Amino acid sequence: MLVCFDPNLNIMKLDGVMVSLHCHHYNCGLVKALEEIVEINAVDIFVRAAAEEFYLNFTNYLLHHGKDKTNQEKLEAAAELYRFMGFGRLDLSQLNESGGRAYTDSSYYVVGWLAKYGRRRTPGCHLTRGFLAGTLASIYGGTVDKYKVEENHCMITGFDRCEFAVSVNK
Amino acid sequence: MAIDSKKVIELASRLPIESNERGIMAAFGIYAAINYNEFFFKAVSRVIYKVNEGAAQAVEQKLYDAVLECGNHTFHGARTSMHWREHILPMIKSPEDEVQALVVRRVIGPTD
């Protein structure tokens, strides 16, 4: 993974794709604003947007760097991307094409939310759900909505680690 | 003004802002994360498009407030850092200089 900054254009790119470096005040504020909308399920839109972007960009990454990689190595590359971007530490070793369980013992949204708002009673790692859905569809093939990802347990509610249940959409 | 914008950008671009082994990127008193610009555009624009005008304005106000909080915390963290005192503060001769240095540094620091 390579981050480049162009001081003349004031833009930053990760592996050639325009990115931003946002702080937890903004990222968690965005999640909170979306969660508070009652008219629609804005969190689902947030998860879907994340899935699309990670699907697109990880597919592109694998085209250039994943030709000789096994699926397990691709999962490890996905976890490394997640870590590199600052979202935390993912264990994807128990996933396969049919889904399974993924775990984090370090989460950006947990750390950021705790720092800004304190503990909460519901899971909050929505971006990770989109990340998993997008990167798994990229690795195993299929459309971006191939996988359904739910967060069963979240550290922000008091668990030792976050647990994500991944299944193939019927 | 006494601020050398190119020098500020060059100094800031060399800051070791990167995630640790636990995937956490802490700098200037905030937690930062890299994400695709298109993700933010998609998430926010789709939500704004789907809700009524009143709800859209409420969301926009909350996002505006989030940006203000970010700016306040990030700028405070930057201007009280050792890096700032060592490299930037010597250039600052007036409040206007400090504002300019913060804006220049913001170009590559956490943006919101």
Image (tube, coloured by chain):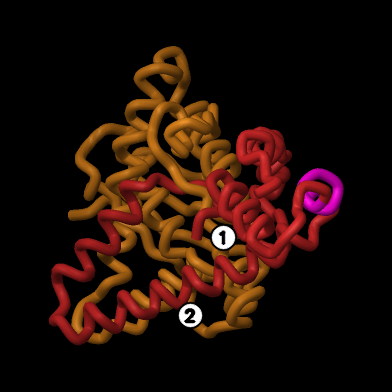
Task: Residue at the far front: name it.
Answer: B1
Helix, strand or loop at label 2? It is loop
Residue at image position (45%, 34%) is A13
x then y, percent, for residue A119: 61, 82
Amino acid on which disc 2 is placed: Thr
Density class for disc 2 (Cα within 10 Å; few <14, some 14-19, many ≥20) is few
Judged from this view, the residue extending furthest toward the top is A68
- Height in image: A161 above or below A121? above
Helix, strand or loop at label 1? It is: strand
Q: Is residue B17 above or below residue B75?
A: above
How many angstroms separate mark 1 from mark 2 (CA)? Answer: 22 Å
**Magenta stretch?**
B83-89
Tell which subunit mark 1 falls on: A
Q: Quadrant of residue A53?
A: top left
Q: Is residue A47 above or below residue A117?
A: above
In the image, A83 versus A33, the foreground residue is A33
The residue under label 1 is: A23
Instruction: Tell me the number on the disc at residue B85.
Output: none
- Say which quarter of the image contains residue A126: bottom left
- Find disc 2 in the rendering and name its residue: A122
In-image side of B53 versus A153 (left or right): left
Drawn colour of chain A? orange
Q: How many marks?
A: 2
Q: Which secondary structure type mostly characterizes the magenta part of the structure?
A: helix
What residue type is disc 1 on? Cys
Quadrant housing the C terminus of chain A? bottom left
Which subunit holds the residue at mark 2?
Answer: A
Q: Which chain is red?
A: B
For the residues beneath circles 1 and 2, the answer to whether they share a chain is yes
